[in-house]
Image (spheres, grey):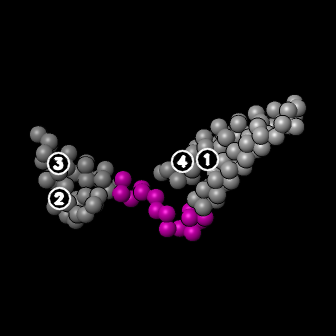
Amino acid sequence: MTSSNNLTISGPANTSAAVDMWVGVGELDRKLMADLERSFRDSLFTYKEPLTATLIAVYVIVFILSIVGNVLVIVIIRLDRSNRGVDAYLMLNLAIADLLGTPTLIAFRFNFNFAS
């Protein structure tokens, strides 16, 4: 076996030993599994690039500011008795919609940028 047939989950391990636990696995299957493991390992995304770290930081900051800001808007509208007009209820609905939408959209965007 070559060194490319080693699994690297928590350290080097013998691929054939892991494969041999399945009954009836041949040499072709071992090669296919080694190729699959190698392509998976090569496709892993690293977060060492400066642009990636910057994007993650921006997403986290936008997420936290959105949650804190919208919760503050809801609390202020609910506590202030003078804000009982139509415009206050529209802002309250907008803050609630933003609270529901922000985690979803950031999760989709995060998945789009950093998956695969």
Q: Residue 72: percent from the left, percent from the top?
A: 73, 47
Residue 14 badge: 2
Q: Quadrant of residue 39?
A: bottom left
Q: Secondary structure at mark 2?
A: strand
- Prevailing secondary structure class for the magenta stretch in the rendered image: helix
Q: Amino acid at mark 3?
A: Val
Which label lies toward us, 3 or 4?
A: 4
- Pointer 4 local density, CA inside 10 Å: few below 14, some 14–19, many at least 20: few
Tell me which residue sits at (15%, 53%) in the image: 16
Quote the CA–CA distance across marks 2 and 1: 40 Å
Residue at the image position 36 percent from the left and 53 percent from the top? 40
Structural distance between the alpha carbons of marks 3 and 4? 32 Å
Tell me the kind of residue under disc 4.
Asn
Within 10 Å of disc 2 (Cα), the crowding (few <14, some 14-19, many 20+) is few
**What residue is pinned by disc 3?**
19
Q: Give the x, y percent position of residue 32.
A: 25, 48
Q: CA distance from mark 3 to mark 2?
A: 9 Å
Residue 4 can be seen in this image? no
Residue 96 vs residue 28: left or right? right
* Earlier residue among tags 4 and 1: 1
The residue to which callout 1 is attached is: 106
